[in-house]
Image (cartoon, rainbow, N blue to C red):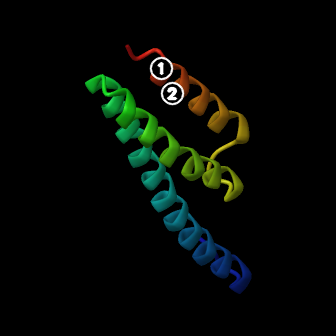
């Protein structure tokens, strides 16, 4: 448990930051899920549109420190390959 005023403040800041990052991560996952669903349905046009919407969200997560750059790049690469492979 935090004892000093500085440590108490840090604990509050960490909790606030955790909530923001949690919301951001959840939003990104939702965008990725829509791409996955479009791929599963076999609708290439919808998958392309969902991928175009998901890309900036994922990269924004990188700039905000939620995801590592390589993680986001790997996710985008794998998703785009799967969208491209749709009949």
Mark 1 secondary-structure assignment: helix
Residue located farthest toward the bottom when viewing the structure as drawn: 5
Residue 9 picture quarter: bottom right
CA gap, disc 2 and disc 1? 5 Å
Residue name at image x 63 percent, y 38 percent: 72
Q: Position of residue 34 (x, y in %)?
A: 35, 41
**Crowding near the residue tagged with mark 2, few <14, some 14–19, many ≥20 C-alpha atoms within 10 Å:** some
Query: Looking at the figure, which quarter contains the C terminus?
Result: top left
Query: Looking at the figure, which quarter contains the N terminus?
Result: bottom right
- The residue identified by callout 1 is 82
- The residue identified by callout 2 is 79
Q: Residue 25, which numbered label?
A: none
- Number of marks drawn: 2
Relative to 31, 55 lies left or right = right
Residue name at image x 62 percent, y 75 percent: 13
**Crowding near the residue tagged with mark 1, few <14, some 14–19, many ≥20 C-alpha atoms within 10 Å:** some
């Amino acid at each position: 448990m935090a004892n000093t005023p500085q440590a108490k403040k840090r604990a509050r800041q960490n909790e606030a930051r955790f909530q923001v990052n949690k919301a951001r991560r959840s939003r990104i996952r939702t965008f990725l899920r829509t791409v996955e669903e479009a791929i599963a349905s076999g609708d290439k046009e919808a998958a392309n549109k969902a991928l175009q919407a998901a890309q900036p969200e994922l990269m924004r997560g990188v700039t905000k420190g939620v995801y590592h750059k390589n993680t986001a790049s790997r996710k985008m690469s794998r998703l785009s390959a799967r969208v491209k492979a749709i009949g």
